[in-house]
Image (cartoon, rainbow, N blue to C red):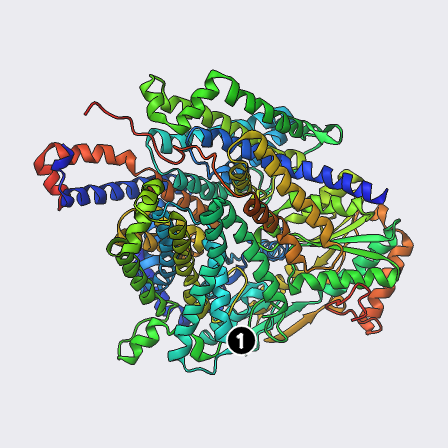
Amino acid sequence: MSSEITPARRAGIEVAVVASALIAAFAVAGIVLAVIGADPIEAFGILVYGAFGYPEAIGYTLYYATSYMFAGLAVWVALKAGIFNIGGEGQAYLGGLGAALPCLFLDTLPPILLLPLAMISAAVFGAGWAAIPGYLQARRQTHVVVTTIMFNFIAGALMTYLLNNWLLAPGGGSPETRSFAPQAIMPALHEILALVGIKIAHSPANLSLLVALLAVACTWTFMFRTVWGYETRVVGANPNAARYAGIDPGAVILRTMLISGALVGLVAVNEVMGVHKRLILDFPAGAGFVGIAVALMARESAIGLVLASVLFAALAQGSLDLVIDMPMINREVVRLIQGVLILFCGALPSLFRKFITRLLTQSPAAAQAGAL
Amino acid sequence: METATQILLLVAAAIRLATPLLLAALAGLYAERSGVIDLSLEGKMLAGAFAGAAVASVTGSVWVGALGAILTGIVLSLLHGFATVTHRGNQVVAGMAINIAMAGLIPTVAQAIFALGGQTPQLGPAQRFLNVALGNNALTFFAFLAVPATGWLLYRTGWGLRLRAVGENPYAVDTAGLPVARLRYQALLVNGALAGLAGAYLSMAANAGFSRDMTAGKGYLAIAALIFGRWAPVPTMLACLLFAFADAAQAQLQTVRILPSQFVGALPYILTVLVLALVGKGGGMPKALGIPYVKERGA
Amino acid sequence: MHRLLSPVLMLVLLALAPAAVTAADFMPAIVFDMGGKFDKSFNQMAYEGAEAWRKENGIAYREFEVTSPVQREQALRQLARRGAAIVIAIGFSQGPAVATVAKEFPNTKFTVIDAIVDAPNVQSVVMREQEGSFLVGMLAAMKSQTGKVGFVGGMDIPLIRKFAAGYRQGALYVNPKIEVLENMTGTTPEAWNDPTRGAELAKAQFGRGVDVIYAAAGGTGLGVYQAAKDAGKYAIGVDSNQNYVQPGTMLTSMVKRIDKVVGEAFTSARDGSWQPGTRDLGLAADAVGWALDQYNRPLITAEMEERCKQATADIVAGKIKVSETCSNAACTN
C-alpha cells in the first residue's frame, strides 16, 4: 500500500494536512476571540491585513521572518544530529556582542569590509557560545538541554554586565551602546532597491533577509549533499551505527553545535546591525525560542522552514494592528492564539493526517486531486 | 556562632527554594519515565499557581485551592496527552504550545475574574500553606516525602516496572499485551497533579496570591534538574537542592559587593555547568523518550 | 460587505491619517514598554494616569503594550498615523524610537517619560527618583533598630541604580554608620516578575540583621512586602503608593507621579498648552515623594515626618545634593 504513494501524492497529503491544521487552529482561536467579545472574522482580517496588507507591513513581516529563519535553521541543524539546542536565545545574544564589537571599534573600515567582518564575528561569537555545551555533550555526555538552558541565563548576566559597565554609550543613561556609524549598518531593502530605481515602503527588512535565504539553501545543501551532512544525519539517526561506520559522533556533535550557534548568531546581524543599529538589552526577544517551533514544523522541507518562519512572522507583525485596532484584544490574547497555532500546526497535524491519508489513498481520483 | 547561623539560614532558604523545583521535577519524572518529554512544566505551574490562589481566595480554603491547582494541572496534562499520546504529535512542540498559551490565557482569565491587573486578591492565613513544623509548610514536607514514594512506586511496584518499560521499550510492553497509551496517560495524571502543586507552592506558600508570570522560568529549571538527576528520584532531588543552594548563596554573596551583581547572579548556572562537566557521563535517559508510539498494525 | 471593505478603507484612512487630525476628534495614545501596563511599576502608573484621565474627560485613548524591541518604533508610528494628537511613550528604552518617529510626524506631539529626546515636537520628562529615594532612605534609617537597611532592585541598570543611590544617601544622611545591603534580582526580564525570588532575597537580608527593605523591582517587590509582613519587619513600596498592600508593615512608598505626568500631557495637548522640551521633575515639582496615609500613619512619628520635611526643603533649595550614582558604600563618589 505505502509503496503506491508517489512523492507528488505525499506532498499533496502534507499540504492538505498543514492546511487543515491551520484551519482548525484558526477555528479554535476564533472561538477564543468570540468569547472575549471580538468579531473573529474581522480580527483575522486585520491580522492578515496587518501582516501582508500594505508594503510596510510586508517589510516588517519579512524582517521578523529573517530572524526566525536563522533561529529555526540553528535548531533544525542540531536536531539532525540528534541534539536539541535550546540555547539559541543566548547564542543570538552573544552574536549581538560579536556583531557590535567591530561595528563600534572598527567603523573606520569601508562597509564592504566591515559588514562581512561583523557578520563573521556575529557567527563566531554565536558558535563560541554554543561550543562549550557542544564540547560537554560530545566529550562528557553532559546533556546539552541542561547546559544550553544554563548558558541562556549566563548570557543574560554577561550581556547585562557588559552593557551596563563597558559598552554603555558615553553619558547615556540606558544600558545600550551608542548608535553605529552608517557604514556599520546592514542596508535596508528599500535603500538597496532605491539604488536601482525601485521604490518600496520603508521597513526594517534588510539585506539579512537574503543572507537568511542563502543560509537556508546552504544548510540544505550541506545536510543532504555533503559528506559532513551525511555524517550528521547518521549520528542523529543512530550514534552506534555511526561509530561502526567509522564516524566519531563526538566530533560530529561538536561540529554541528558550532554550525548551529553560528547560524543563530546571525540573528544579531538582522536585529543589531539591520534594525536597532546599536546593541540593546534583550534584543533577541524570544526569537531563539520561536526557532524551536519553526524547526519542528519544517520537518524535512526547506520551503517548510521558510513558510513556518513567515507564519510566525505574520503573527508577530499582524498582531500589532490587531491590538491597536481592537481594544479588547491585548498581547495576552495574541499569545494565546500563538499557543493554539503552535499546538495545532506543530503538534497535532497527525489529527488530520490519518484522515487525509485515508481519503487521498483510497480513491485514485481523490489522490490525484490531492497531489495537484 | 555568626557563621553557624548564616549557614542554617542558607540551608533553610535552599529548602524553600528547592520545593517548587522538586515538585515540578518529579512531575516531569513521571511523564518522561513513561516516554513523554514534558516541556510544559512552566505552563502547568503557572496555571496551577493561578488556579490554586483563585480557588482558595473564592472558597476561603487552602485545601480546596490546592485541589483546584491539582485539577488544573491534570487538565493540561490530558491536553498534552491528547496531542502527544493519542495523536502522536511532537511532544516538544505540544509542551511549548501549552507554555505560550498559558502565558496568554492565565492573565486574561485573572483579569476577567478579579480585575486586579492579572493578580488574585491577597490570600489570608486560612487560604495559605503556613509553616507547620521546623519552619516549613505542608507542601515542602509533601515534596520531600514524594521522593521516596516515587522511588518505591517506580522500582518496587508492578505499575512502576510497567511505566519504566513503556519509557524504555513500548513495543515490548505492547507485545506483552499491556496498554501503552493508558500507562502514559496514568503517568501524565500524576504529572499534572504534581506540576499543579508546584505552582500552588508559589502562590499559596512562598507568596500570598498569584501575580503575573510568577513562575519566572522555574519550570525550565526543573527540567534541567530532572535531566541533571538522570531521571531518578534521589539524584533529581539532589539536583534541585544544588540549584536552590546556589541560588540562596548568591543572594547572600551579592550583598557583600565584591563581584558585580551579574556575575554573582549567574553563579548558580555556572556552578551547575561546572558540576555537570566534572561529573560527566550522562545516561539514564529513557530510551523511548520523545518518540511517539505507533502501534504496529498486522501489515 | 463592511468586513470585506474594511481593509481597503483602512488603507485609505492610513493614507489620509496625518491630514485627518482635528481638535474635534482629539485622540490621545500611549505606548507602554515591555513590562506591560500591569507591571506593578512605572507602566502601571502611566496606565492608571491614563485611565483616570479617561474617566474624568470621557475621551478614550489608544494604547499599545510593546512585546519586542522593534515594536517600539512601529507602535509609535502606527498610532501617529492613525491620527493620535499626542503619543506618550513610557520608559527609557523608547527614547531612540521616539526620536526616529517624531521626525517622520512633525505635526504629532510626543511625550517620552524617563528619556531625553531633543526634537521640536517632543516633550521629555525625566524624574529624579534619587530625590524621592533619599527621603525613604531617611525614613528607613530612622525606623531601623539594627542599623542595617536593605534594597532589592529588579535588574542592575542605570535607572535602578538611581533608586539605590538615593536610598543609600538618605540612609547615610540620618545615620553615617548605617549599613545598606543591596540585592539585584536577576539579569533577564523575568527579574521583574519573580516574587518568590524577591521573598528569598528579603529573607536573606533579614537574616543578616536588616529590618527595613526598599524594593524597586516591579512584581518582584510583592514577594519582598509579603516576606516583611511574615517576618514582622518593614518594607518600602515604589512607584505607586503601595502602603495598602500590607498595612502595618509597609513603612511608606516612594511615589513617582507618572500618572500625574500622563494626565497633564493629555490635558495640555488638548487645550494647546503642551510645550516641547525637557521637564526635569523632582521633589520641587511634587513629582516624586513619599506616601503618608491611613495605612502607615501609625508607623511614622512626628519627628520622622519633621526631618523629612526639612530634608525636602533642603533638597529643593539645593542645600542637599542627591547624586544619581554611588561608586562606593559610603557614597562619597
* Left-right relation of A363 to A71: left
Question: Is residue B275 positioned above or below B192 on the image?
Answer: below
Q: In the image, residue A328 lies at what x, y percent?
A: 46, 48
Residue reaching furthest left?
A365
In-front residue for pair C27/A1: A1
Image point 48% across, 34% down: which residue?
A: B284
Secondary-structure class at tag 1? loop
Image point 54% across, 79% down: which residue?
A: C120
Q: Quadrant of residue A21?
A: top left
Question: Is residue A192 positioned above or below B141 on the image?
Answer: below
Name the kind of residue labelled 1 in the image. Asn
The chain under label 1 reads C
In-front residue for pair C118/A305: A305
How many labels, in total?
1
Residue reaching furthest right?
C303
* Left-right relation of C89 to A184: right
Question: Is residue A220 positioned above or below B280 on the image?
Answer: below
**Can the viewer see residue C54 in this picture?**
no
* Left-right relation of A96 to C287: left
Q: Quadrant of residue B50?
A: top right
Q: In the image, residue C127 lies at what x, y percent?
A: 68, 66
**Can the viewer see residue C278 in this picture?**
yes
Q: In the image, residue A98 lies at what x, y percent?
A: 48, 67
Q: Which residue is mark 1?
A: C121
Q: In the image, residue A154 lies at what x, y percent?
A: 57, 55
Q: Quadrant of the C terminus of chain C?
A: bottom right
In-front residue for pair B215/C140: B215
Q: Residues within 10 Å of mark 1 (few under 14, many from 20)?
A: many
Image point 29% across, 64% down: which residue?
A: A214
Question: Is residue C94 positioned above or below A35 on the image?
Answer: below
